[in-house]
Image (cartoon, grey):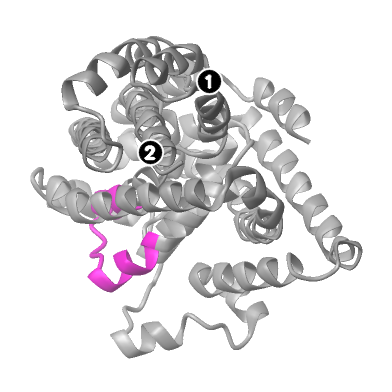
Amino acid sequence: MIAGLRALGRKVPAPGWMILALLLGFAAGVVLGQASSGVVAAAGLIGGLWLDMLRMTVVPLVFALVVTGVAGLRSEAGRLGGRMLVVLAALLLLSAVVAALLVPPLLAMSPISPTVTDALRGAFPPASVSVPSATEAVRALVPVNIVASAAAGAMVPLVIFALVLGWALGRIEPMRAAATLAPLQGLADAMVVIVGAVLRVAPVGIAALAFTIGASAGTGAIAMLGHYILVQWVVAIVLAAACYAVARIWGGAPLWSFARAAAPAQAVAASTQSSLATLPAMLAGTARLGVPEAEAGVVLPLAVAVFKITAPSNALLVGLAMAWMAGVPVAPTQIVLAVPLAIVSTFAVLGMPGAVSFVAATSPAAMVLGAPLELLPVMLAVDMLPDMVRTVANVTADLAATLMVARDK
């Protein structure tokens, strides 16, 4: 399956084409948008159809991935060891909490013009999300009718049911569990193929949506996206800095020693934007820190494969940023509900192509936050710009996690 997904990923347009489509579509919208309402309507129709084809896969894809992923955790836990699972889960929770606390005030530092907000809200109406009380929010966690939850796009109860179902399937006889897991795995594979096919024409859809944004919001959208990218950088830098503290307090490494050991891997990460490419440098760094080669040789490859500390923060950041752009108020209760979804989605999208995983990982939290998913392709198009600093943070977290796991062995 993984080989097939990687082959599919190679067919998805390169990020450069997406950014070019975004820039051309936006520029055309600013220049031509006011000249003809018919052109704007046509662009909105094309972009809307493309986006709807993408959105129709979100619920079945997330459900199938969570069920099959949780059901397989029993065998995975035996490989990883309980200590490593706890360490990775704690770091992912840290990532989500940092984003939940930092992102709202950081976004608020750059108020959006009411004209731009009204224009975006008119072009991309936000989802209607009622903010429940604390008691109602807790009661709503358990779905009474899972079909109704799926139809309504209620991601929190849907994911909770998927978690429980996956846990139950992991505890029954494998042969019997396979009767349910095989169709769900096939469903997940089929959804990935559909998403990949839709993303092959991503430049067309992104250009159409960008045209609509340019025509409605004008040049104010440039500053808006620039601030969003800046917030991405700030959050990733904060997470990387937090990993230094983790390595010192729980990993037992002096700060200067950890910084020197991590620097080569961070340099490779910044230049390649690939955690996998940094593996040799990370192995050398852990050896310099005194981690036995036998332990680092097991922990680091698994950390690179299944762990990205910036994934939960990015899922929350994208949803909060889309709500901020459209002027959608987000209640603290919604952010609290989005935190576990951001963490679960980290594991649900393992092994998927980058663009496909971006959609699957960010959509659940965005839906809970009431953000307009119509802006998601724009976020996808600019996602490569902050990816360098996110990769550096991910590599730093891999090294810190390895120290934490090795310290108690």
Dividing the picture into quadrants, the one containing residue 394 is top left
Element on which disc 2 rests: helix
Label 2 is placed on what type of residue? Arg
Is residue 338 among what the camera can see?
A: yes
Mark toward the viewer: 1 or 2: 2
Query: Residue 24, position in %: x, y?
Result: 40, 20
Q: Is residue 75 above or below residue 263?
A: below
Check if residue 46 falls in the magenta segment.
no
Element on which disc 1 rests: helix
Task: Name the mark on residue 276.
Answer: 1
Q: Label 2, on which residue?
A: 407
Query: Residue 263, position in %: x, y?
Result: 28, 14
The residues bearing labels 1 and 2 have C-alpha atoms spaced at a distance of 23 Å
331 sits to left or right of 170: left
Q: Is residue 27 above or below residue 409?
A: above
Label 1 is placed on what type of residue? Leu
Task: Name the mark on residue 25.
Answer: none
Region rendered in magenta: 319-339
Check if residue 326 falls in the magenta segment.
yes
321 sits to left or right of 141: left
Query: Residue 32, position in %: x, y?
Result: 34, 28
Quadrant where the image shows the N terminus: top right
Q: Residue at x 69, y 26 (%)?
A: 6
